[in-house]
Image (cartoon, rainbow, N blue to C red):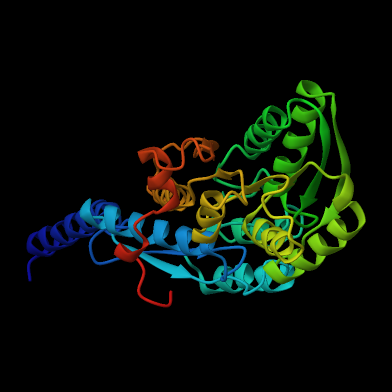
Amino acid sequence: MTPSARSRRVALFGLIVLFALAAAPACRRSRAPGAKGKALRIAVIPKGMTHEFWRTIHAGAIKAQRDLAARGIEVEIIWKGPLREDDREQQVQVVESFASQGVDGIVLAPLDEKALVRPVEEANRLGIPTVVIDSGLASDEIVSFVATDNSKGGELAAQEMGQRLGGKGRVLLLRYQEGSASTTAREEGFLSRLKSAFPGIEAISSDQYAGPTRDTAKRAAENLLNRLGADLDGIFTVNESATAGMLLALQDVGKAGKLTFLGFDASQAFVDAIRAGQLHGFVLQNPFRMCALGVETMVDHLQGRPVAKRIDTGVMIVTPANLDTKEAQELIYPPLQLYLKPGE
């Protein structure tokens, strides 16, 4: 080979290398998260797995997955959480496990606003971001917080209670459990609005907790009714299990419908109780929309689009007066059957 031919060959090889280097970023961009052939792996971690509320959260995640697929964005939803809503250690372990697996992102409803900070921040340091839904987390290292305005939910209950009691009476607030930011906001919103708007109403008990299940709530409710039932005009319970437990306790002692009772979250049993005059209203969130927005917000973040740090998913109170309206019915009966298999 002549020197000139050798020079031309070296020059040609150099051009090929430069072209390959220039093309490499474009190749990587074509394999960006969610691109065809590479699904985003998003872990969705609820507080628990047993209540109707979490089934609705699950359905919202699947809806987001399908809506994103229609836009050409492939997402794999991995659904896992603790069985009981008081198992902080198990939820921490679930977050840690997904972080070690290297999922693309986490959508989390934290059981405890402090206990979940460390695993979430450790995941963030590994490059795995978290969107928090439903209940707050005491950390700035999250992408966004997608949830109900829970303080407003408590205020709506207080307003309904005050109007039903004519501004006078004695009520009890049955709390959920310590460390839960969502229900704490509901509790404080209720007490604050009651104090400011209805000074003639006295909260004679506001320091008792229902615990994580309907059974623990029923036992707590029975104790309160035994001690305070004779002097009681109204009750507010702050989540699905607490409301279910209190309803059962009131039915057992023959007091259902004899005092004003307001709850939080929806179930068929609560709808039946309203129609029977045993429950006078429940504050209603939109968990279906909440989780769908949580997943979509995570995808937007992973794909480099700006997202809001706080997204309010709405809240309303359902009473006998508006129970059968379209707005209430759509929130009470989200289309779970379209997104969940039997038993999920």
**Residue shown at 73% from the left, 31% from the top:** 165
**Residue shown at 68% from the left, 37% from the top:** 154
Between 278 and 40, the one nearer to me in the picture: 278
State left or right for residue 117 relative to residue 170.
Answer: left
The quarter of the picture where residue 130 lies is bottom right
The C terminus sits in image quarter? bottom left
Between 98 and 180, the one nearer to me in the picture: 180
State left or right for residue 119 relative to residue 59.
Answer: right
Q: Position of residue 292 (x, y in %)?
A: 41, 51
The N terminus sits in image quarter? bottom left
- Considering every residue shown, the one lying at the far right of the view is 227
Residue 339 makes an appearance in the image: yes
Between 195 and 147, the one nearer to me in the picture: 195
Residue 105 makes an appearance in the image: no
Q: Position of residue 49 (x, y in %)?
A: 56, 70
**Residue shown at 53% from the left, 59% from the top:** 53
Q: Position of residue 241 (x, y in %)?
A: 65, 61
State whether residue 55 is above or below residue 184: below
Q: How many marks?
A: 0
Q: Position of residue 197 (x, y in %)?
A: 76, 22
The quarter of the picture where residue 305 lies is top left
State whether residue 166 is above or below residue 122: above
- Considering every residue shown, the one lying at the far bottom of the view is 343
State whether residue 194 is above or below residue 106: above
The quarter of the picture where residue 85 lies is bottom right
